[in-house]
Image (cartoon, rainbow, N blue to C red):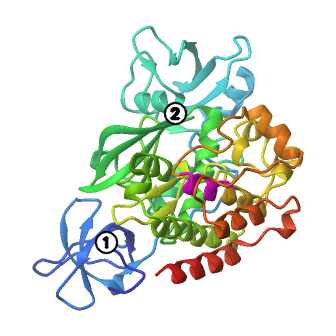
């Protein structure tokens, strides 16, 4: 199979095939398909057609990779949200008097609530959206988790409104993320997504096991409040630009009552839990080097892309069914300084001193985190600084304290850790150098 095609991966069709031969797929230009397997027919694959769910043969020469989504601050899952504008300004925005034209704004009279403004029969009707506990509602009957959920409902059902919501009025300067994702082939169908059991939990929602068109997947179910959507759009956009065997692969995004990020399923879970549950008897030292090398290769790729992960830790390294370690969770991946709210979410025990003290992030601050990750691996999943509080870690590390070697850790590995913890970031090795050193260790142990 050509290197750029792989089972489970999605591709866009370059042309139409509206009159297929026996066993071939019918498709139109721009359709999304998933490769299932190679075919006995050279240069052809068995594939699943997303619009119809049908399976059949398709030639490689009609397939192209999906284009990346540009990281753009104008992208919005809620282009109809205009923020803090007055009722008069909302009327001005909807002055075309087009039935069903709508926008949502923050309530000035009732801080914390919102207002849905809808054009109907030459007038603009204002509906106050009440925030009650963790739900949003216009009437006592229909309650919603978030604004996206509410708007989606009222585009299908009129409910208590004077009209269904027919057309959003975008805020000036925004771009519809839904349109951009769909155009590039990254928008998946909720109808083809099967949600399974919960396998993890993050700050903004649960991680679920599931299936997409019969393929095992992991699904981040994002609680889409206004502050969270931009963060996860940025994460999604970054993931569309990345393709490496040691990075968790993004399959696509589903928009339904919020946001679902659909990723390849890593059946053996995160590396921290993997090591803790199996221990030294089941995971030999040689395997530890394989895991570390996998992660170094994935991080070298990010380094080349000039992307900073900022949250490298064993909990964010996932293990495939074949035992490959892959870097995941790009929620803090950026190329610029973090905002104040992002700084408050930093994993202190894994973060370099210059990042803690001066908000300075780089690939070399990721190298510091890689040193902590090495410690976790050779401590078989134990958390770093086990007897210290976060406050103590912050104070002592910034004053020069460094972790002692884990029990039975080879001296050469501990030396590698210490090189990652140089106070001067410029003196720390690059991920390229770390990879080379780990490759030598791997070769010496074979």
Which one is nearer the viewer's eye here, 446 or 341?
Answer: 446
Camera sees residue 79: no
Q: Residue at x 76, y 72 (%)?
A: 429
Identify residue for label 1: 7
Question: Does the magenta run of residues contain 20?
Answer: no
Q: Give the percent coordinates (x, y) of residue 365.
A: 77, 58
Identify residue for label 2: 223
Q: Residue at x 30, y 55 (%)?
A: 216
Tell me, for residue 302, which label it has, or none: none
Above or below residue 216? Residue 258 is above
Q: Quadrant of residue 366?
A: bottom right
Q: Secondary structure at mark 1?
A: loop
* Residues in magenta, as a range: 372-379
Q: Is residue 395 left or right of residue 258?
A: right
Q: Give the percent coordinates (x, y) of residue 410.
A: 61, 65
Above or below residue 207? Residue 184 is below
């Amino acid at each position: 199979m050509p290197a750029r095609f792989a089972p489970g991966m999605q591709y866009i069709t370059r042309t139409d095939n509206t009159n297929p031969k026996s066993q071939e797929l019918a498709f139109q230009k721009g359709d999304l398909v998933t490769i299932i397997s190679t075919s006995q027919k050279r240069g052809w694959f068995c594939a699943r057609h997303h619009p119809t769910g049908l399976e059949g043969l398709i030639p490689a020469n009609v397939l192209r990779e999906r284009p990346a989504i540009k990281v753009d601050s104008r992208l919005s899952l809620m282009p109809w949200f205009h923020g803090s504008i007055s009722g008069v300004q909302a009327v001005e925005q909807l002055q075309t008097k087009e039935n069903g034209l709508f926008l949502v704004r923050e309530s000035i009279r009732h801080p914390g609530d919102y207002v849905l403004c809808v054009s109907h029969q030459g007038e603009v009707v204002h509906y106050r959206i009440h925030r009650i506990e963790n739900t949003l509602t216009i009437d006592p009957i229909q309650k919603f988790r978030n604004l996206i959920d509410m708007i989606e409902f009222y585009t299908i059902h009129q409910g208590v409104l004077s009209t269904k919501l027919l057309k959003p009025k975008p805020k000036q300067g925004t771009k519809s993320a839904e349109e951009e994702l769909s155009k590039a082939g990254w928008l998946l169908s909720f109808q083809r997504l099967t949600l399974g059991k919960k396998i993890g939990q993050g700050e903004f929602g649960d991680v679920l096991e599931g299936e997409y068109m019969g393929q095992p997947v992991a699904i981040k179910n994002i609680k889409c409040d206004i502050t969270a959507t931009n963060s996860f759009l940025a994460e999604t956009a970054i993931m569309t630009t990345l393709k490496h065997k040691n990075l968790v692969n993004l399959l696509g995004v589903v928009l339904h009552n919020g946001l679902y990020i659909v990723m390849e399923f890593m059946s053996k879970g995160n590396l921290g839990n993997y090591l803790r549950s199996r221990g030294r008897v089941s995971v030999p030292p040689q395997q530890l080097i394989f895991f570390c090398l996998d992660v170094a290769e994935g991080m070298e790729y990010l380094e080349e892309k000039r992307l900073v992960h900022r949250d490298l830790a064993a909990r964010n390294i996932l293990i495939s069914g074949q035992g490959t370690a892959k870097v995941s969770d790009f929620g803090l991946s950026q190329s610029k300084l973090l905002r104040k709210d992002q700084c408050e979410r930093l994993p202190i025990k894994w973060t370099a001193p210059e990042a803690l003290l001066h908000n300075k992030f780089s690939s070399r601050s990721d190298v510091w985190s890689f040193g902590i990750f090495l410690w976790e691996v050779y401590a078989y999943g134990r958390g770093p600084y086990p007897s210290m509080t976060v406050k103590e870690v912050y104070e002592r590390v910034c004053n020069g304290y460094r972790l002692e070697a884990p029990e039975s850790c080879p001296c050469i590995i501990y030396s590698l850790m210490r090189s990652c913890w140089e106070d001067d970031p410029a003196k720390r090795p690059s991920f390229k150098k770390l990879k080379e050193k780990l490759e030598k260790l791997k070769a010496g142990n074979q």
